Every structure is written in C-alpha cells, then in structure tokens.
Image (cartoon, rainbow, N blue to C red):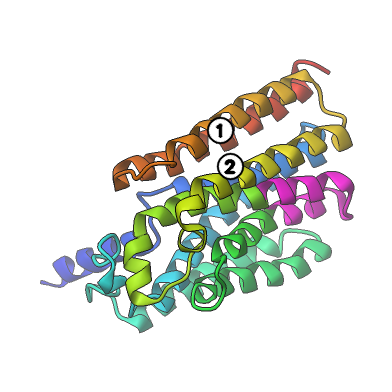
Amino acid sequence: MMPVILKNKMQAVTDLIRLTKPYGTLLLLMPTLWSLVVASEGAPSIKLLMIFILGSFVMRSAGCVINDIADRNFDGHVERTRSRPLPSGRLSVIEAASVFILLTTAALWLVLQLNSYAQRLSLVGIGLAILYPFSKRIIRLPQMVMGVAFGWGAIMAWIAVRNTVGPPIFMIFLANLFWATAYDTIYALMDQEDDRKIGVKSSAILFGRHTWLAVGILFGLSSLFFILLGLTAGLGPAYYSSIGAASGWFLMQSWTIRRPLDRQIVFSLFKSNVGVGLLVLLGLVLNYHLFQ
C-alpha cells in the first residue's frame, strides 16, 4: 500500500510544479538567454548557461507552488484548475510548502555560484515570485507584475556576465515586460468568466471587448523595445529579421482574438509565444556567429 501512496504523492508533486507543462519555464528562460547572449556578445559560458537554465526551471516550479498555495480557495471554482493537487486534496498545504522550501533552497545554491551583485538581486526575484499570485486580488493588471517577475532573470543574467548595468538590458527587460503582459493577457482569456465570479482580477477583464487592441499595443511596444535593443547593442540584419517575423506573429495573435474563441485555440495562441522567444534567440545567435 505504501508504494501506491508514494506514487500518488509523487504524481501530485509533478502536477504541482507543472513538470509536464514546460512552456512556462521556456517563457521564463527566453529573456534570460537573450540577456546572456547579448551580454557575452554571443559567447556565454557553459557554467552560466547551466545555472540560468536550471534556475529558470526551479524558480518557475517554485512560482507554481506559491501560486497554488495562494489560490487554493479559488482554484476549485475554476474549470481549468479544479483538478490541481491542492483543491483536489491530493496534497496538503504543508506538503506544498515543503516543496516550495526545497525549490527555493535549490535556487539559493544556484545563486551562490554567481557574483555578489547578482546574489543581491536574487532576493528581489524571490519576492516577485511570491508577490505575483497575491497581486491578482489587488491590481487590475496583475499580468504586468508577472512580466516584471519573468524579466528579472534577464537582469540577473546581465549582471552575472558584466557586473554592471547597461542600456541593452533595459531594452531587453522592457521588451519582455510588454511581451509577457500581452501573452499572459491572452492566457487570461481562458478564465475571465470564472475570474469574474470569484473576484480575481486580470487584464482580460480590465480590457474587456478591447482586449485585442490592448494586446496589439502591448505587442507593438515589445517590438519597439526589441528594435531599440538592436540599436543600443549594435545588432545586425539577422536579428532584425527575427524581430520582423516575431512582429508579424504578434499582429496575427492580436487580430485572431478580436472574436470569441474556444479555450483550446486561446491556449494554442498563448503557447505559440515560446516559438517567438526562440525566434528572437535564434536571431541573436545568428547575429553573433554568422554575420559579424
């Protein structure tokens, strides 16, 4: 009987940290990799790559855990989330909190491999991960809080390489902020009816029937800061080609959500942004290794 109980608990932990849903980790990782590539002029060290890849997985997992703990009394009322480990009773709050402590301990060990400047910045990153779930009760645009949290790794990566700030990192951070706010607004479309009933705030509710336009503006601002990144970092045609392709995909997403869509289509649009992040990364890598 014990092995079955243990197996069920392990499956619940897997679900808690979204192990089989890596798109969140990839979306968190993308701006971090952009930053590493630009800061190192196309040659990031293997050590830093491993630290930030593992760190993105660990921090995204920790973010999911604290999100589920914060939302445990709401998730049971939302169709998409009612089967999560806490509302379904497969894990207790204490068990989930123990997983969070283990993950943050792992994150701390990774951070200790970085310079002292990056170590200090990591405290802000943990605070943002904890803040985001609770911002949905207070702020009408919590997706922007998530955008800040998802861009913090990029700042840490830049500092880990250069130990100082510079104009390109601000462009990366702002490009990611507006991109993340836009794609998470698309994600929020799936839950807007349930969110209204339980009193959770979101940008999809805030923008209402103008969501497609707001998302288009957010994507447009992201494209603007990607262009400014190219100018401040002296990037070339390969990079600008990738930004042109990404901007075309931004336009398509904004246009598609003008009309009501079923959840599966909305979810597919959201997940497609992983491809956008990879496209930008490809443009950066090609810029440094083929065209310079």
For this orientation, the residue located farthest to the top is 291
Residue at x 75% of width, y 58% of height:
114
Residue 216 badge: 2
Q: Is residue 41 left or right of residue 256?
A: right
* Secondary element at tag 2: helix
Q: Quadrant of residue 148?
A: bottom right
- Which portion, as a residue range, is magenta? 154-176
Q: Would you place residue 242 above or below residue 174 in this image?
A: above
Of helix, strand and loop, which mostly describes the magenta segment?
helix
106 sits to left or right of 266: right
Residue drawn at (87%, 55%), measured in percent from left and top?
A: 163
Whether residue 46 appears in this view of the structure is no
Residue 243 placed where, x, y %? 67, 29
Q: Answer left or right for 129 relative to 242.
A: left
Work out whether residue 198 or residue 292 is closer to the camera in this orientation and state it.
198
Question: Label 1's element?
Answer: helix
Query: Against 221, is 195 above or below?
Result: below
In terms of image quadrants, where is residue 233? top right
Question: According to the image, label 1 marks what residue?
Answer: 251
How packed mark 2 is, by other alpha carbons closer than 10 Å (few <14, some 14-19, many 20 or more), is many
Give, as a three-letter code, the residue at label 1: Leu
Question: What x and y, as percent, mark residue 274?
Answer: 51, 39
Q: Report the residue at 74% width, 44% height from top.
A: 35
Asked if the residues shown at circle 1 and circle 2 are in contact, with their CB atoms under 8 angstroms apart, the answer is yes
Query: Badge 1: how crowded within 10 Å, few (<14), some, or many (20+)?
Result: some
Residue drawn at (54%, 30%), measured in percent from left and top? 249
**Quadrant where the N terminus lies?**
bottom left
Nearest the viewer among 40 and 112 is: 40
Disc nearer the start of the sequence (1/2): 2
Q: Amino acid at mark 2?
A: Gly
x and y, in percent, of residue 210 in the image: 51, 51
